[in-house]
Amino acid sequence: MLKFEISKKEGLARVGKIITPHGEIKTPAFVGAATKGTVKALTMKEMRELGSQAILANTYHLLLAPGVELLRQAGGLSNFSNFPFPTFSDSGGFQIFSLPDVKITEEGAKFRSVLNGDKFEMTPESSMRAQWGIGADIHMAFDHLAKSEDKGEMRKAMERTHRWLERCVLENKKLREEAANRGENEQFLYAVVQGGTFLDLRRESAEFCAKQEVDGFGIGGVFVADGMGEMLETVDSILPEGKPRHLLGMGQEPRDLFIGAEFGIDTFDCVGPTRMARNGSLYTLDGRINIKNAKFKEDFSPVLEGCDCECCKNHTRAYLHHLFKADEITAKVLASIHNEHFVVSTVDKIRETLQSGEFQGYKQEFLGRYYSDSGV
RNA sequence: GCUGGAAUCGUCUAGUGGCAAUGACAAGAGACUGUAAAUCUCUCGCCUUCGGGCUUCGUAGGUUCGAGUCCUACUUCCAGCA
């Protein structure tokens, strides 16, 4: 069983730590999205230096390349990526949702690679096997996402997710025993709660997931920040308190991090911060700025005054602006360091203020400034 | 000096009698939430009440209902010959 120790509670919010074979994660925490085994534009050394405690890779992407067998040979994701700290793997469920030409049956999903036309199939069982091969500490159940206004469709996706979850749990048991017999590290499974924007479906999904033999929970299929607090309140009131909860894919907007933590989320992952960075959109306490804008050409202040990331400590907005305009790789590196550090440290601060009882004040101050129109 | 060729939006470029005129780059702005994302979208002659109006393809004339496109002269540039 995955160890999760809670040191402080405030409503649904909690401060704690998840203890994995690769070390512990102080929660709430922002987990870096390392889809293909790397956080785009960043080295693992840079990730640690900017404060990242954990990363999350994607089973679908690693399955296609370099393949699960290679990950196994390499000694698992942590060894292969040289990130000897806690790791997560996402199941590939998101790819069912995001890739074109996906056929979903009760058995699983068939993808077609647009790159080389290869057919590719994933089932709850194959996702579990792949994740055990990849060797991340924490796995996600293979789920079926839907983004629909239609409740009937959402229910179908949710119910399929539940049936798939039972298969995941069953397969996971086998794989866990096999690994134990080989004397390997334990690996852990999170169920994924679906239900979209329908609170009754979310409730039903949370109740279903809560009953399963899993180590924690992912909250999936969240596409709109509107109503997320209410949804999380519903779900996290049902999920067992003693198991960690991961909010899948949300965290591009600081608002999401505050609301998530407030309503019981322990870990976040999101591709937003690094993608924003590569596209020149950088976080400041007054909202994001587009560093490519002409107004930054002669701005010799750091991206964020007082920020202690390697980008802000050493470089100016004018320099970043120049690097972006010149299409230099370093632009994306520095910007990614800054954005990733921004969200990681914001969640760190959320954790600290939850611990000290100053969370509400911090939240008001941060969000009031970040989302005020006065801007930069 | 002679003979050929060429001049189009910041740059390069399409255009061979019929709609301010192609594409790329540059420039300006926007989007991005479990990464098919080093991506994508929009603007890019001037004005506009978004209906449209006005002025444009080196310069000046001409032919034509109509000219970036054909003709004449000039200017500049390129190539070859001297």
Image (cartoon, helix red, strand yellow):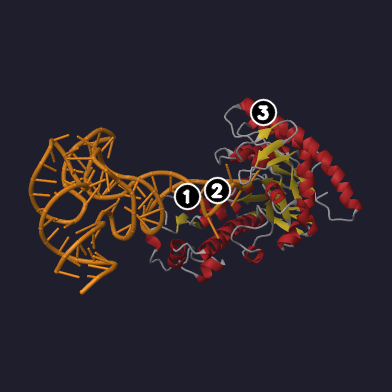
Q: Residue at x 74, y 60 (%)?
A: A80
Q: What is the chain identity of the residue bearing mark 1?
A: A
Position of residue A317 in the picture relative to residue A236 (left or right): left
Q: Earlier in the sequence, mark 1 or mark 3?
A: 3
Q: Are marks 1 and 3 on the same chain?
A: yes
Q: Please tell me whether mark 1 sits on a helix, a strand or a loop.
A: loop
- As drawn, is B80 to the left or to the right of A237? left
Q: Quadrant of residue A75?
A: bottom right
Q: Nearer the viewer, residue B30 or A353?
A: B30
For this orientation, the residue located farthest to the right is: A181
Q: Are marks 3 and 2 in contact (CB under 8 Å)?
A: no
Q: State the mark number for residue A255.
A: 2
Marks 2 and 1, how far apart at CA: 9 Å
Residue A27 spot, x, y in % from top left? 69, 54
For label 3, the SS is: helix
The quarter in which the C terminus of chain A is drawn is bottom left
Identify the residue position indicated by label 1 in the image: A371
Q: Amino acid at mark 3?
A: Arg
Which tag, 2 or 1, sits closer to the chain's start? 2
| Neighbourhood count class around disc 1 (C-alpha, 10 Å): few under 14, some 14–19, many 20 upward | some
Front residue (pair A135, B55): B55
